[in-house]
Image (tube, rainbow, N blue to C red):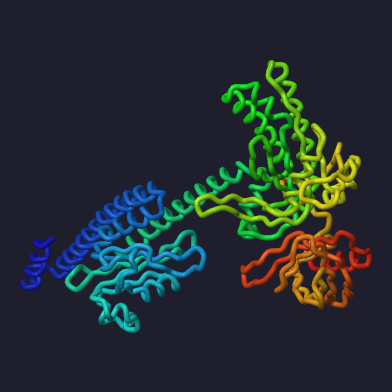
Amino acid sequence: MGELNRALYTARQASASAIPEAVVAQAQALGDVLVEAKRQQNILKRGGKDLETLLEVSRALNQEHDLGKLLERIMDYAIPTLNAKRGFLMLRDEGTGALEVSVARGMGGDLEQGEARVFSTGVASRVAAEGTPFFTANSKGDTRTAGFASVMRSDARAILCVPVNYQERNLGTLYVDNQAGAPGFSQDLVRLAQSFASAAAGALENARLYQNIQEETRKRSSLSRYLSPAIVEDILKQESDLALGGSTVECSVLFSDVVGFTPFSEALRPEELVELLNEYFTLMAESIFKNFGTLDKFIGDATMAVFGAPVFEPDHAAWAVKAGLDMIEAAGGLMEKWKSEGKPTFKMRVGVNSGPVVAGNLGSPQRMDYTVIGDAVNLANRMESAAKHNTVAVSAATWERIKDYAEGEALGPVKVKGKSEEVPVYIVKKIQPPSREAGQIKRTAPRADVELFAIYVQEGVSGTRQGIIRNISAGGALLQTSFPADAGNSIRLNFTIPGGGGQVKDLVGHVVRAAWIEEGGRKGYMVNLQFPDIGEESRSLISQFVVKKNA
């Protein structure tokens, strides 16, 4: 190429008669074509090399599923790939959306120890906001960086910063720079940086997805040891609504026990005893889970289960009793099997009580378990003691909740430990709980999200109080208030339906759960109410309002 240019120069210096002007023009055009061809060849070579580099980077990044290690690997590849001396990666906090420096190279200080570094977060933040790359060969003389104090304070000369986007969603920014005397950044390198950032974004999303799957698998595995599959699904979908830290809820508690365990255990070797008990407990747990219960614990040869917590279930009493009957039936079949195999057998009994309890994670920092405590729990245990062999005994509180769809008989007042007076006991023989579909409560009345000012009177509290009804149906409501309420309390509501819809007066709501919540701008006690005996006028007003609201 150099010889051709020298020949052209010589031709121009020669006389016009020596070489015709047309020939000189043709030679010049040929030279231009050859120069451009050489430039395109270099671009293709460089592009091929860049493509190979990106493929290698993409493979390496997508093989790492540990997010912390992936961040380190991204910067380890970014610095040499982009011919930079140093840089950092900023990512958005998944909760707040704020940009934070996640990993850095060559910036000085210790990121984990919080030591001072000079990060040009102004440039990085602008790139994230605008969604376009930024590069400059001379940051000190570039008017675009004059307003960034961090750039002025640093010794960075050439700066390159690109957004890290995944499917049009900004995850953060990748920033690299060079000091004076080091190479600058070209437009070709900007394109390479964008491609690199795209590969990094894909790897980051894969790592986060992998972590989310691992965490959900861990949660599902842990929860499935104690909860029914339907409740596990509810918890994983609505975790923010759970009150695991300790709250008063209304639920039903079940206790079952083996009758004659001592002679049974004495007839077996220890390893045989454990084997048979595990077979028995497996059937008991299955009966609890299929009826939407929570296996609280095994206590020796006894079983404790909770229905209606941690996920609220309005028909908790019915499902607890159904579980007890299923447990007795399953145990009966198992005893027949053991008898045919020449093994010892036993009888069992079940007790259920319903009422307010304190539910939450209890224990020490080293070991905590979700459980329920309170007088209602103690009475459930006393019901089990009062039950006859292979029967389910329930308290008056439970019987009142299930009597419309259960068959049973009164056992009579019974003296129980811890109570000064005899308490009514009922033996349940058969029950058919209300329907439940796909693990979800089947609501009998449509519900609407609303914001209605309400005045109410609370049982056991003098004077009136105020609150906001957040959602409502003819069957119940969610009331936000600044005042606490206990499960089992009654609240008498008064509110006006907007748009001339009328007034609802003295509507009695039964508190089934109340918890303090600070979420989404809402702060206060969220009180779940059921309307056990709503009048026809109030039902009609609320139902018409809900239909219009949802239209």
Tell me: residue 332, above or below residue 360. above
Of 193 and 392, nearer the camera is 392
Residue 222 visible here: yes
Q: Nearer the viewer, residue 533 or 102?
A: 533
Vertical side of 262 occupied by 200: above or below: below
Is 485 left, or right, of 275 in this rendering? right
Q: Position of residue 242 (x, y in %)?
A: 64, 57
Q: At which x and y percent is residue 551?
A: 80, 65
Q: Which residue appears farthest toward the right when viewing the image? A: 536
**Whether residue 327 is situated above or below residue 222 in the rendered picture:** above
Q: Residue at x 82, y 68 (%)?
A: 459
Using the rendered view, name the quadrant where residue 20 is placed: bottom left
Asked whether, in this view, residue 312 is left or right of residue 163, the answer is right
Query: Where does residue 522 sit, x and y in percent of width and height?
Result: 65, 71
What count of labels does the image hold?
A: 0
The quadrant of the rendering that contains the N terminus is bottom left
> Can see residue 449?
no
Instruction: Single out the residue that lies furthest toward the front.
Output: 420
Question: Based on the displayed image, in which of its 4 quarters is residue 297 positioned?
Answer: top right
**Above or below for 344 versus 470:** above
* Residue 509 location, quadrant: bottom right
Q: Position of residue 309 (x, y in %)?
A: 69, 52
Task: Answer with left or right where residue 69 lies relative to residue 364.
Answer: left
The residue drawn where x is 69% and y is 16% is 342
Q: Of 299 and 263, which appears nearest the observer?
A: 263
Q: Residue at x 70, y 60 (%)?
A: 248
